[in-house]
């Protein structure tokens, strides 16, 4: 019996050191940039009136060094538990694909929220969502970029290191930039920024990178866009190279009819 207890204690100690005292090593706080997310060729069509230039919550993810913690508990999401903060959630944590954001919230709770139940900051549905809203208020990424001279543009890309350093300077830690491809843009577009935090919500340098941003230039898109190097005409984007041909056609039509 004594031998069994020693073995059990040893195993528990290994597990604790492997995944942290709360069941995870660190937290990833992911914020989406709606214009980039919705323009990405990898995303479905977004609901237009939801898109603005402020970063919105994607999720708060308890994580291990191998990035494998998901679906940790069977407790189901109940929207009644977030009723006191629902109006704040709808603004800061909207869904761009459906009119019912609770579907998105339930997904994030099941996949990620249930893995933070051991942490006092995340224990239970209300605490998980309320802590995430507090982090969203704390880290205003759009303002961080603006203060460092970076504003949204569909014409001019930014050096990726300039954006990374601007955010790191403001949040006091290295961040992950997530990018995707988009039709009409020769460089990747910024779709998401991820911060890494300790179990006590202190910023730390993110320990891994899965960015898809390359090493050169990326676009930080505005709410209203025209494709890179293009001109917006009647809601359509027309390439500069096409303008001379378009003018010729218009001239011919004018002479034929008049």
Image (spheres, grey):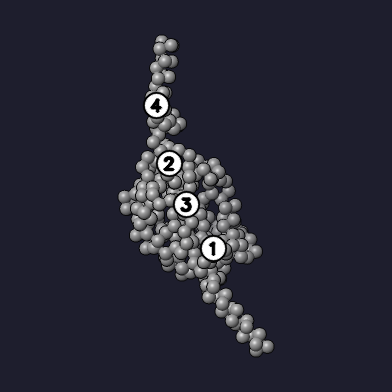
**Among all residues in the image, which is located at the extreme front?**
215
Mark 3 Cα within 10 Å, few/some/many (few <14, many 20+)? Answer: some
Real-space Cα distance between discs 2 and 1?
31 Å
Real-space Cα distance between discs 3 and 1?
17 Å
Q: Residue at x 40, y 29 (%)?
A: 241
Residue 248, percent across and down? 40, 20
Mark 2 Cα within 10 Å, few/some/many (few <14, many 20+)? Answer: some
Dot 2: what SS? loop
- Residues at badges 3 and 2 in contact (C-beta under 8 Å)? no
Dot 1: what SS? loop
- Residues at badges 2 and 1 in contact (C-beta under 8 Å)? no
Real-space Cα distance between discs 4 and 1?
49 Å
Quarter holding the N terminus?
A: bottom right
| Vertical placement of residue 82 versus 221, above or below | below
Q: Residue at x 47, y 51 (%)?
A: 212
* The label number, if any, that marks residue 243 in the structure image: 4
Q: Front-most of 176 and 72?
A: 176
Where does label 2 land, which residue? 186
Q: Earlier in the sequence, mark 2 or mark 1?
A: 1
Quadrant location of residue 174? Answer: bottom left
Residue 202, percent across and down? 42, 67
- Residues at badges 3 and 4 in contact (C-beta under 8 Å)? no
Q: Residue at x 60, y 79 (%)?
A: 11
**Among all residues in the image, which is located at the extreme right?**
1
Of circles 3 and 1, which is in front? 3
Real-space Cα distance between discs 3 and 2?
14 Å
Where does label 3 land, which residue? 212
Residue 41, percent across and down? 51, 43
* The label number, if any, that marks residue 67 in the structure image: 1
Q: Front-most of 145 and 136?
A: 145
């Amino acid at each position: 019996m004594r031998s069994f207890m020693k073995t059990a204690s040893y195993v528990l100690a290994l597990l604790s050191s492997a995944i942290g005292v709360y069941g995870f090593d660190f937290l990833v706080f992911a914020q989406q940039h709606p214009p980039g997310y919705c323009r990405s060729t990898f995303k479905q069509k977004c609901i237009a009136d939801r898109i603005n230039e402020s970063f919105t919550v994607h999720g708060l993810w308890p994580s291990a060094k191998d990035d494998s913690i998901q679906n940790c508990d069977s407790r189901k999401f109940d929207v009644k538990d977030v009723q006191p903060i629902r109006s704040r959630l709808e603004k800061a944590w909207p869904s761009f694909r459906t009119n019912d954001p609770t579907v998105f919230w339930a997904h994030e709770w099941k996949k990620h929220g249930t893995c933070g139940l051991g942490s006092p900051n995340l224990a239970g549905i209300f605490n998980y969502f309320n802590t995430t809203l507090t982090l969203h208020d704390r880290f205003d990424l759009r303002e961080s970029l603006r203060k460092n001279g970076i504003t949204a543009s569909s014409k001019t890309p930014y050096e990726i290191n300039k954006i990374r350093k601007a955010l790191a300077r403001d949040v006091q830690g290295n961040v992950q930039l997530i990018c995707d491809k988009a039709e009409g843009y020769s460089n990747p577009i910024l779709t998401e920024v991820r911060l890494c935090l300790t179990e006590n919500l202190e910023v730390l340098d993110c320990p891994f990178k899965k960015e898809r941003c390359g090493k050169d230039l990326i676009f930080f898109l505005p709410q209203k866009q025209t494709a890179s190097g293009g001109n917006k005409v009647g809601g359509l984007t027309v390439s500069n190279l096409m303008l001379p041909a378009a003018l010729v056609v218009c001239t011919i039509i004018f002479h034929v009819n008049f």
